[in-house]
Image: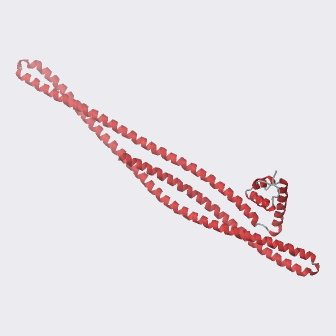
Amino acid sequence: MGRIGVSYEEVATAAQEVQGKGKSPTVDNVRLVIGTGSKSTIARHLRDWRNQQGIARGSDGAIPSELLGLVKGLWERLRDTVEQKGYEYQCESDEKVKQIQQQLIQSHQQHASLQVQYHQLEEKWHQQTKTTNELQDALAFEQKEKAKIAERSASQESHRQEQQSEIERLHQLLKHVQNNLEHYQNTTQQLRQEQALHNEKQHNEYEQRLSVLQQQMTSISAEKLSYQARYEQTNQALENVQLKQDALSQVAHEAQTKYHLLSQEYARLAQQYQNQSNDLETKKQSVIETQIKLATYVEKINTLEKSLVKADDKIQILRDNFSFISQEKANLEGQIKQFQQGISLKQAESL
């Protein structure tokens, strides 16, 4: 069972808070905010509150208390929206960081693959050099054999005809070997040139990528400083708006207190009017003066209401700017950290 003795003020405050959240001020919703209380008692106070709300809107315009409840509810809804957007921005920034990390990994893999290809080409060039040396040794050996055959031809003139055919064969073999040697030398030179051009092209591409990354890092650093300055300015403006809102709330509370005092004074004057019918003209004049005062206070309350609406709009804009700038700052800091780590790794590898 709910406790007995829930006051009218508690029910009225809870109903205004529920109404500020965009919900209907029913008995269950009001009891959910209070947390306790008898439903019959809450229903009675809620009925009185609704009647008071009707009188207030029709005659004396009790707007500040309702506005306070609306502002409180709107503030909670604004806070939930800002938190949701912050979570979405965080997910988006995490996804961008993952993409940058994947691109960096692919760049490292491509660099490793190019190094493997370079080592393979270098090994192939060594093999071709070895083959050329072997052919040169074979040529020297053939030249020695040719010298021996010439000496035999000089000493054995009688067998010149028989050795002549062998000499011609050796000449053809020597010519063939020389042709092969020239072919291998040309091929080796061409491979060296192609390898040098390929290595130079890869080196230039790597230097260009490193220059682009350094430029991006410089640009991001400048943007970070700019966003930090904007963040500090926005934070200061938000604090000023909050101070103004507190001051307006205090003024609204004071106006509401004065309104209750004036309501009591109006009731007292009405009672005197009923009891003193002989002094009707004098009491009418008093009622007119009281109504003039009420109109003045209603005008002041309307002015305060407009000020509260403008302050609420400014708070909404500043909250959106603050959330966006905070998210951009976190995003830029993450990207700068990733670029710095990548550059440190590349410098370590180059060393």
Kindly tell me whether residue 247 is visible in this rendering.
Answer: yes
Residue 306 occupies which quadrant of the picture? bottom right
- The vertical placement of 95 against 190, above or below, is below
Q: Position of residue 340 (x, y in %)?
A: 44, 51
Q: Identify the residue at horizontal 78%, vertical 54% (top origin).
A: 36
Q: Identify the residue at horizontal 56%, vertical 58% (top origin).
A: 325
Kindly tell me whether residue 205 is visible in this rendering.
Answer: no
Q: Identify the residue at horizontal 23%, vertical 30% (top origin).
A: 180
Q: Nearer the viewer, residue 294 or 180?
A: 294
- The vertical placement of 221 against 96, above or below, is below
Q: Where is residue 232 in the image (x, y as percent from the top left)?
A: 54, 63
Q: Position of residue 94 (x, y in %)?
A: 54, 48
Residue 34 occupies which quadrant of the picture? bottom right
- The vertical placement of 254 against 102, above or below, is below
Could you tell whether 140 is left or right of 39 in the image? left
Q: Where is residue 4 in the image (x, y as percent from the top left)?
A: 83, 56
